[in-house]
Image (cartoon, helix red, strand yellow):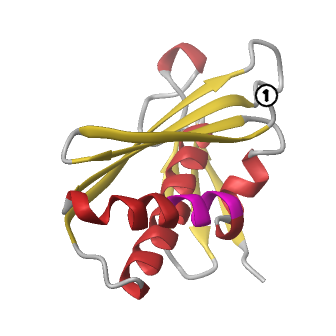
Amino acid sequence: MPNAKVTYQGKMVFEGVSGSGHRVTMDSAPEAGGENQGIRPMETVLVGLGGCTGMDVVSILNKMRVSFAAFDMEIFGKRAADHPKVYEHITIRYRFNADRADAEKIVRAVNLSQDKYCSVSAMLAKSARIDAEIYINDEAITSVSHGVG
């Protein structure tokens, strides 16, 4: 079972330690009492989403024997105006430097991650619409949505 320990460090700083021993420092903005010494907790959610879906996509593309020169994601989250200010809309922009001939396989890998494998995406889709935009060599290929909304 995955686990974590989060320890108060003072002011608004917390240190998180994952069950696998990796550390992350979290803090809030100065206007919220913090000192901007670490990532915001809600930012970690978006980073976790990117890591989860990215690992899925790479694994699937490796199984399909699709190579790529580069792959990154930009993730944008829009939160609710009222507390608890959950994410209501998330856009993941998947960007590949790859052979355009592999576009169909890349789209399939992203869809499999979003619809079947990524547990972070599945959790967030219960409260947010998630749009996946796929670009190959800076050309928009397709956009798909899932989740609420």
Residue at 31% across, 53% down: 72
Q: Position of residue 100 (x, y in %)?
A: 22, 57
Question: Magenta region: which residues?
Answer: 110-115
Mark 1 crowdedness (10 Å alpha carbons): few <14, some 14-19, many ≥20: few
Which sits in the foreground, 125 or 85? 125
Image quarter of the C terminus: top right
Q: What secondary structure characterizes most of the magenta part?
A: helix
x then y, percent, for residue 121 = 67, 54
- Taking 92 as reference, is 107 above or below it? below
Q: Quadrant of the N terminus?
A: bottom right
The image shows residue 9, relative to residue 140, as above or below, that is below
- Which residue is at a point 32% across and 85% down the rendered structure image? 65
Number of marks in the rendered image: 1
Q: Is residue 27 magenta?
A: no
Q: Residue at x 40, y 83 (%)?
A: 64
* Among the 4 quarters of the image, the one containing residue 13: top right
The residue pinned by badge 1 equals 149
Residue 73 image offset from top left, x and y in percent: 38, 48
Identify residue type, mark 1: Gly
User: Could you say whether the residue bearing mark 1 is in a helix, strand or loop?
Assistant: loop
Q: 1 or 97: nearer the eye?
A: 97
Q: Residue at 73%, 74% (x, y): give it.
A: 3
Q: Nearer the viewer, residue 37 or 79?
A: 79
Q: Where is residue 28 drawn, in percent x and y?
A: 55, 30
> Would residue 30 be found to the left or right of residue 16 on screen?
left
